[in-house]
Image (cartoon, helix red, strand yellow):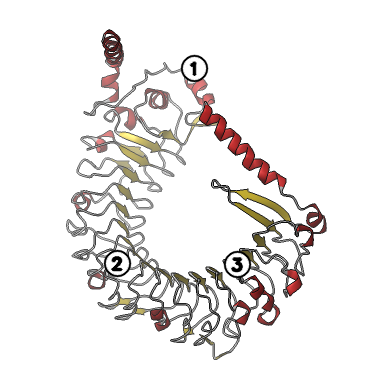
Amino acid sequence: MILLTLAIALFMFTMKSFADFRCPVLEKQTSCTCREDVWWNNDRLTIVNCSHANLKTMPNLSSLSNRNVTKLLLRGNNISSISLSDLGFKNITELDLSKNTLENHAIGALSQLAPYITKLNLARNRIAIDQDLMFMKDLSVLTELIMDSNMIHNYQNDIQVLPNDIFRDLRLHSLRKLSLSSCGITSIGPRAFVGLESIKEIDLTYNYLENVPSALLHLRNLQKLFLGGNDISTIATNSFHSLTSLEKIVLDYNELSSIENGAFAGLEESLKELELHGNYLQQIPSAALKPLRKLLFLKISKNDIRTIHNAFQGNYQLDMLYLDSNPLTFTKTTFQGLEHSLETLFLREVGMTSIPVSSLAPLKMLSYLDVSHNHFHRQTFDTSLSALSIKTLVMSNNSLVHISPSAFLNMRHSIGLDLDNNNISDISFIVHAPLCSFSYVDITGNPLECDCDVEEILHSGTIFDMGLTGFCKLRNTVYELGSSKLEEQLHGFCNRSERIVWCPGKFESNRAVQSNAGLTLMNVWICFVSVLLNKSYK
């Protein structure tokens, strides 16, 4: 009770602090709002939000001269310049000026924020990123810089180059994250990132790069690299060889058809995540991946991979694999090499007509399997899953009409089942399956009828964890499963099922167990009372 009282008091104090900070003068003059966020450690973040306020000039913040404004949001206005007088609050740590009309020559005053500003968002302005960037000079504590959707000013024949040494003299020694997404960059000078050696994350997505820029090799502290949505067709040998701290590479939606054997040389002890989604690869780049001892996550969906043979015989311990949207055929050795590591597997939209149990059975650690958006050749799902170790099976959008309880006989443990958006009208398979076969069943988006099987499943507790979720229909009315209104309706024509309070180690048919449910509950009660009496006696 004391803890609850303290929690309520803390919540009320936080809300009071939030409510206390107002800026009536500024609110009257503009559409700006003010608030104060109080964190668990009592740190306060004072926020002035003037986003989408139809401003053509910086707002007059003089009425807040007695406040310690830390975050100023000016996104989505028509501000074209910033002067020294506009920046009376030199202790601002976060400034969002995205989606305005700012140009290089009109924002020199930003350098006045040098002692405090850590995050600066200049995306979608009119800043020439290949020209004088001295307005950012000496922002020595700046950690995050976003310049997405700006432009290269000097270009010929559609060649837009990010030039050498453009950041060299800015002294951005604390910068950790740089985003230059959607800037129309076709190439990057080999010394373009000199001066940014402290960077850990760089985003170059949605440009027109045709190869991995050699300029990146200077960024030896780089941990995350985003190159998605470019025009890269080949990953050449040694493309990342000096980036020994690199943990994540995203290369989705490029033109990749070739990855050379030594493409990831230098990343053997660092690379953990690799995304190659949406390219033109016809096979798993096995030789390039083999030395990557730390690789855990591989997304190679939406390519043109048809067969997989000895592709995962590597030094890594891959635990998550996306193979969606590839026209795959499966054999017993498809996943050879992943038997003792793979935990999560996505096989959505691969054209399968049934779950390839013989291919999946060797995967002893597999717990999550998604086979949504396939074309199961029979409307009744009766494939035995007893050979699999899965704990969650997603089978949404597969045109299934019936589920057979035989599919869940002799399971090693209970399973979560996602059946969204099929054509299932009855769920009697849950009743007839062994007791506690399911930790949850999601039946959303199916034409399920509200019947006595639904009542039994909801109230017996045979689905013991998250239960049964979704909707069912009764006399042209749709009810949410588990709602009190549905319960009232079901009890009008169904006997209330007895509650099962725990799941036995050995699965038994639900209805076979129910005849003994009363006796079982009585035995539990007798044991409980006996223990209490024994303790009292001692």
Pointer 2 residue: 305
Residue 413 in which image quadrant:
top left
Residue 139: assigned label: none
Name the residue type under label 2: Ile
Q: CA distance from mark 1 to mark 2?
A: 55 Å
- Name the residue nearer the viewer: 348 or 377: 348
Q: Earlier in the sequence, mark 2 or mark 3?
A: 3
Residue under numbered circle 1: 492
- Which residue bears the numbered disc 3? 117
Q: Who comes first in sequence, dot 1 or dot 2?
A: 2
Q: Looking at this view, is 264 or 349 the one in front?
A: 264
Marks 1/2 in contact by CB < 8 Å: the verdict is no
Q: Is residue 261 above or below residue 332?
A: below
* Residue drawn at x 72%, y 74% as measured from the top left: 82
Residue 261 placement, left or right of 166: left
Alpha-carbon neighbours of circle 1 within 10 Å: few (<14), some, or many (≥20)? few
Q: Residue furthest bottom?
A: 156
